[in-house]
Amino acid sequence: MFKAIFAALTAMTLGSSALAQADKTDAPRWSIAIHGGAGTINREQITPEQDRTIRSVLAKALAAGSQILEDGGTAIDAITATIMILEDDPNFNAGKGAVFTWDRTNQLDSSIMDGSDLSAGAVAGINGTKNPILLARAVKDHSPHVMLSGEGANQFSREQQLDQVSSDYYATPYRLQQIEDLLAEKVSAADVDYKFGTVGAVARDSQGHMAAGTSTGGMTGKRWGRIGDSPIIGAGTYADDRSCAISATGSGEYFIRLGVAHEICTRIRMRLPEAIREAQRAVPKNADGNDSYVIHASEFRLSDAEVQQIADDVIAELGALGGDGGIIYATPWGQAGYSFNTPGMYRGRATSEGQQSVSIYGDEE
Ligand code: GLY
C-alpha cells in the first residue's frame, strides 16, 4: 500500500516518466510458484538423498517456467512446461509416479486455467496420456468443453495426437507398495501421505496475465470413480487476471466443499476496491483542505501481508472443516507464495526481481 501511495506521489511530483520508473522497480514483471504436494513431510522422514533429489527436480521445474517468463512467454506456457517436468518425474503423484486405485489402475486428473480470458480445461479419471496437463490444455484450446472424463477423454487425447503410454508407464515400486499396504490394511486410506503428492504451478507473466494448473493421480486406493479437487475449476485450480492464480494440493473433498481456489481469488478481488477506498480516506489534507496526494486505483495493490492473510484465512477454514493441504498463489502485482496447514509442502517460487527459492519443510521460507 505504501509503495502504491509512493508511486502516486512520485508521479504527481515528477511526472509520468517517474511513475513508469516507480512501477518498474516496485512490482516484479513476472512471478511463478510451484508445488509437488503437501503432507507430513519432516526431516525425520526424508533422507538427505531424497531431500536433494526433490529440491533438484523442483529447481529444474522452476527454472524452466522462469526462463519462459523471462523470455517474455505467457503464464499459460510457463505453467504447462513446469507441470510437465513434475509429471515426468517419478517422485510426485502425477503422470509417472501416480498413485494406484483400489483396482490397481491409475486414473489421473488435471486442469488448467488462463486468467486472461477465464478459459479452462480439465480431465478426470484418464489414463494413456503421458502428460495429463497437455490433455487439460487441449480440452481448453481445442474443444468446446471445460471438462472431459474417462474413456471419452482418452479418446480425445488420441484424436489430439498427444503422446500415449502403456498402462504400466505410470507405475513405480513405491506406489505399488503403497497400494499393497493399503489393501493389506497396513495403513488407512485416510493416511495423509497416501493422499498427497499432487503437482501444480501458478504464474503471472510480463503482460500481466495469470495462469494456474494442477495434475494428480488422486488418492491411493480411490474407488467408485472418485474425483478430487485437482480437475475441478474453482476448487483445485483457478486463475483470473483481476485477482490471482491458485493451485491446490491436499484432501480434495475439503477443497471442493470450500471451493478453495475460487474463494481465495474472490476474496482478493473483493478486498481490492475496499482497500483503495480505505487508503483514499486516509490521505492527509493539505492547508487548503484538499487531499495532499492522490491514490490512483490503477496503481494500487494489496500488500504482501494482506494477500498472505487472505490465503491463510481460507486454509484455516479448510483445517477447521477437517481438511489438510495447501495452495500456491500468484497475484497480478507479482507476489508469489504459499499457504498450507501440513508440516511440509514441496514448493518453490521465483520472480523477475531475483527472488528464487525451493523449500520442503514448514520452517523454511
Ligand atoms: N488433491 C488431490 C486429490 O484429492 O485428488
Image (cartoon, helix red, strand yellow):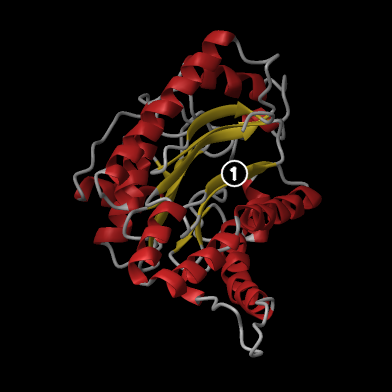
Residue 12 or residue 56, whichever sits in front: 12
Horizontal and vertical percent for residue 353? 42, 43
Q: Kindly tell me whether residue 171 is visible in this rendering.
A: no
Q: For the image shown, how many numbered marks are present on the structure?
A: 1
Horizontal and vertical percent for residue 7? 48, 65
Residue pictured at 40% horizontal, 55% vertical: 211
Query: Where's the C terminus, which quadrant?
Result: top right
Residue pictured at 49% horizontal, 21% vertical: 54
Residue pictured at 39% horizontal, 61% vertical: 120
The quarter of the image that holds ligand 1 is top right
**Image height of 171 relative to 44, above or below:** below
Question: Is the shortest distance between ligand 1 and the CB of mark 1 under 8 Å?
Answer: no
Residue 13 or residue 159, whichever sits in front: 13
Name the residue furthest front.
287
Q: Would you identify the image quadrant in which residue 24 lies?
A: bottom left
**Image height of 232 relative to 77, above or below:** below
Q: Which residue is mark 1?
A: 338
Residue pictured at 55% horizontal, 16% vertical: 51
Q: Kindly tell me whether residue 178 is visible in this rendering.
A: yes
Query: Where's the N terminus, which quadrant?
Result: bottom right
Amino acid residing under circle 1: Tyr
Numbered disc 1: secondary structure: strand
231 horizontally vs 128: left or right: right
Residue 180 or residue 228, whichever sits in front: 228
Horizontal and vertical percent for residue 172? 45, 19
Horizontal and vertical percent for residue 30? 38, 50
217 horizontally vs 254: left or right: left
